[in-house]
Amino acid sequence: MPKRVVVVASGQTERRALPLLVRGFADDGVVIEDVRIPPGNRQIDLGMAAKLIRSAWFERAEQERPDKFVVLVDTDRASPENVLAPLSELPARLDDIGAHICFAYAQPHLEAWFFADAKGMREYLGRDLGSVDASQPDAMQNPKGHLRNLLGSRLYTSRLAGEVASKLDGTAIAGASPSFSGFVAALRNGGTGG
């Protein structure tokens, strides 16, 4: 039986895309029940992550509470260690929560994960991906900007991110992106992904 996993992430793009990106791992028990995001486009810091986890925990009946929380952050251009360090106190702050709390990161942004499935992206876009090295998506400098350029006149929105994610193969992404593979491992086993 799959565990009830709630992901804490930065915005609507993650809310729409993440469940679709991991759908191919459902047979392995990897299912995202919910994605919680900060209100008003706020950053995920220690206090915000704690609030989101508490709300997801206490709003549910005891038998429906999550088994695990995965806090997912973008690294931007920082090291994963530096991005995750401010969150290290989270489990101690939430010692009254009876669920495992673990961490993962998207390097540098979730959009890099899209390019890890180069075949799926080419099919979705109907064009070449330009200078993208799909074998090293985590090394992309500006994946969101590159995606916007490839979309041409189409506006990149969270809805479009969900549409893109629905066309991609999570197994292919996990094979090319260490940060996505770490995210899947955090969903599956816990610990720090990436």
Image (spheres, rainbow, N blue to C red):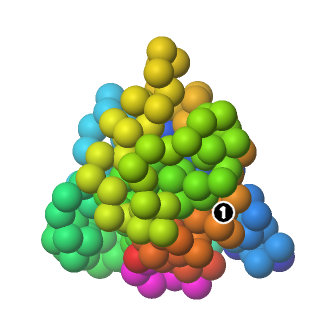
Left or right of 80? Residue 23 is right
Where in the figure is residue 111, as x and y percent of width and height?
A: 45, 48
Where in the figure is residue 133, as x and y percent of width and height?
A: 43, 60
Identify residue type, mark 1: Gly
On the question of residue 101 being in view, the answer is: no
Seen from the viewer's position, the closer of residues 6 and 62 is: 6
Quarter of the figure with the C terminus: bottom left
- Magenta stretch: helix, strand or loop mostly: loop
Where in the figure is residue 186, as x and y percent of width and height?
A: 52, 76
Seen from the viewer's position, the closer of residues 142 and 57 is: 142
| Location of mark 1 (residue) | 170
Per the rendered image, the range of residues in magenta is 189-193
In the displayed orientation, state which residue is furthest to the top.
153
The reply to whether the magenta stretch includes residue 192 is: yes
Seen from the viewer's position, the closer of residues 148 and 79 is: 148
The reply to whether the magenta stretch includes residue 46 is: no
Seen from the viewer's position, the closer of residues 55 and 156 is: 156
Left or right of 33? Residue 191 is left
Few, some or many C-alpha atoms within 10 Å of disc 1 (few <14, some 14-19, many ≥20)?
many
Element assignment for label 1 = helix
Please, is residue 75 above or below residue 30 in the view? above
Where in the figure is residue 77, as x and y percent of width and height?
A: 19, 58
Q: Residue at x 60, y 58 (%)?
A: 117
Q: Residue at x 83, y 73 (%)?
A: 27
Q: Residue at x 27, y 53 (%)?
A: 141
Q: Residue at x 33, y 57 (%)?
A: 140
